[in-house]
Amino acid sequence: MPKHVDREEKKLAIAQASVELFCQKGLRQVSIEEIAKASNIGKGTVYLYFKNKEEIIFYVWDMFAEAHCQKFMSECHEKMNIKEKIMRYFEYPEFAQEGDRMLVLFQQFLGAVLVDDTGILADYSGRFFQKDFDFVMGALKQSVEKNEICTLDFDSLATTIILMIKGMVCLAKARNLSFSKATVLLRKQLIFLLDSFIKEMK
């Protein structure tokens, strides 16, 4: 009787093996052959689950994004104000144990996007960050109902926050900051920005 293989479990195993390689060598330098070897499977088997290396990269980030979203939604509640909601969304406590590895992977990803001449990674990056942008926009619009914020230029504020996130990843690389130090600095800058727009409640 043929052995049953859970497709999602196999994809996850390949993705997890890929993360280590991506962190060590960079996204562009890792080959499908290396991923197959790290996963203890043949090269052809990798292609049964992923069309190419880019699909593996996207699967990895979708997996992390889903974990982050689920954690945030489990802790989010209606009584949170705009500042608390946005600060919590960009804290990533679920990755505290592997934060440094996550930061390196994020840096590798952004670096690969910058030199991507196919547009594949750039397109995915746009969709990936669009989700964060949409969250911030939604939170800002909800804050109007609570009379919390003193700007209606939500697009500019949300764009600034997303650019701040990307910039912090690059700054962490330039200064060789750990995940914990980078998140502390990010928190400080987010507080500074949000406090400039949040109304003082009487």
Image (tube, rainbow, N blue to C red):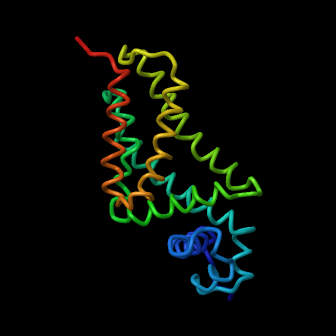
Residue farthest along the top direction in this orientation: 202
- In the rendered view, would you say 16 is above or below 173? below
- In the rendered view, would you say 116 is above or below 150? below
Residue shown at 45%/16% (left/top)? 151
State left or right for residue 94 relative to residue 166: left
- In the rendered view, would you say 2 is above or below 174? below
* Percent position of residue 46, x then y: 69, 77
Nearer-the-camera pick, 109 or 132: 109
* Percent position of residue 57, x then y: 62, 63
* Percent position of residue 114, x then y: 64, 54
Residue farthest along the left direction in this orientation: 202
Residue 56 placement: quadrant: bottom right
Residue shown at 53%/26% (left/top)? 156
Image quadrant holding the N terminus, namely: bottom right
* Percent position of residue 78, x then y: 35, 28
**Count of numbered circles in the view:** 0
Image quadrant holding the C terminus, namely: top left
State left or right for residue 88 relative to residue 48: left
State left or right for residue 75 relative to residue 50: left
Residue shown at 39%/64% (left/top)? 100
Nearer-the-camera pick, 54 or 63: 54
Residue shown at 38%/62% (left/top)? 176
Residue farthest along the front direction in this orientation: 174
